[in-house]
Image (cartoon, helix red, strand yellow):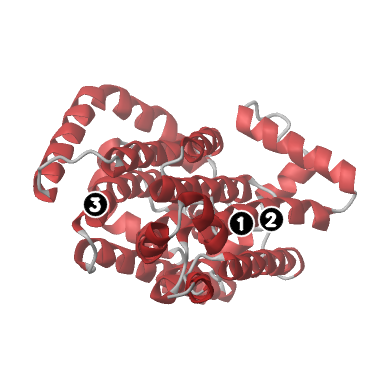
Amino acid sequence: MNVRSRVRHAQAIPGTSARASSWRLATIAIFFLWTFFSVFVYSHFSQLGDSEAYLTGAYDEDRQARTVVITLLSVKLLSLVNSELVAHLVFSMFAASGMAYLWVHAGLHGKYRWPVLAIMLNPCFGVWASVIGRESLFVGLLGYFMGAVLAYYTCKHLRHLLLAGVCLAGLIFVRSAYGIGLAIFLIMFVMYTLPIRMNLSAGVHIVLAVGLAALLVIVAWPALDNYLVNDILPKAKSYFTLTSATTRTWIQLRTSGDLFSGLWWSLPLALVGPTPGEVAARPVMLPFFVSGLVIVGVLLHQLWLTLNGAMPKSVRKVLMLAWLPSLVVILISYVPFGIYNPGSGIRYLCGVLPFLVFPALFCSTVRADSRCAPLRVMYPAHRSSRVLGAGP
């Protein structure tokens, strides 16, 4: 194979500059359209909630640091651009840049694109990720975080790990419960992708991880139970007004026992959002009911991919010991905020939706990296990045 044919072969590999540019442009266009839809269409049927409150300074009395920071950013930005639409677009483009960074580093191709598109084109994601609020900031930071994690897997450069750490700090600041789950993910991911061989089967690793997690929960349970009962559960319920037409007043989560024993029904209900009966009462909720079913379908597909998909044992080990435990923590954290009101629950779920498709992203990265491996052998390191056009 001569040099020219090698270059053509490299350019055909997913994740190269042409494919990366396409994903960047598509992501920016999708977020741009979602912003216009949210501002000019959705806002006529339902309130944009926190977005309007941030712009008008309605949260001035809230002393939580993250609320103060986002309110200050929103008010200053509006005074600078003098246009609510442009202010929304600034937040939207930050989220889009994070997602584009993630898609490019995942080397998205083939069948792995479809779960991503199912999330990107989902109203539960698009409406709230494209306007002012915690969700757009969280989505942007999550995109850079996950992209840095995948880039670290590919080339093991410390700068990617540092970027992931900085983004993680921001994620914990914006949504602390979700951020803690992502911190667990980062620690476990780095542990199981280090070039250190441990001659233990995946089953033994799982048993050890479950045992360690159980021990930590037992030791920390008094503090955790107090945090849930006296902070999280009352706060979650207080966020939703009893006069709202969509508030589920029949749900009562008063203790940690109520939360954990009811996960078998509360988690699916929180993920789907509005029920058929609620859709019949408010037809405007129909798109979000369908969107919720799509989200559940995507989640089930990613779980199947993790447990039964054809992949190397090392990849399955990372998914089962890093992604899956973190996902469990995140979803349990979401339930109290997603169960009381399907409309508001959609917003709370929006930020973590890209994390649901991490198995597809990771498998895409591994496949793209394995297809690039022969070229890294044929070319010196200083030349391969120019040929591939995908140097980190």
- From mark 3 to mark 2, how far is it between C-alphas? 32 Å
Mark 3, Cα crowd under 10 Å, few <14 / some 14-19 / many 20+, is some
Q: Is residue 89 above or below residue 54?
A: below
Which residue is tagged 3? 320
Which residue is tagged 2? 92
Instruction: Confirm whether residue 244 shows in the render.
Output: no
Disc 1 element: helix
Marks 1 & 3, CB-CB < 8 Å contact:
no
Q: Nearer the viewer, mark 1 or mark 3?
A: 3
The tag earlier along the polypeptide, 3 or 2, is: 2
Give, as a three-letter code, the residue at label 1.
Ala
Give, as a three-letter code, the residue at label 3.
Met
Question: Which quadrant of the figure has residue 179?
Answer: top left
The tag earlier along the polypeptide, 1 or 3, is: 1
The image shows residue 204 at horizontal and vertical percentages of 9, 44
Which residue is tagged 1? 129
Marks 1 & 2, CB-CB < 8 Å contact:
yes
Question: Which quadrant of the figure has residue 372?
Answer: bottom left
Specify the quadrant that holds the N terminus: bottom left
- Residue 215 shown left or right of residue 6 in the figure: left
- From mark 1 to mark 3, how far is it between C-alphas? 28 Å
Closer to the camera in the image, 271 or 312:
312
The image shows residue 324 at horizontal and vertical percentages of 28, 51
Residue depicted at x 25% and y 67%: 304
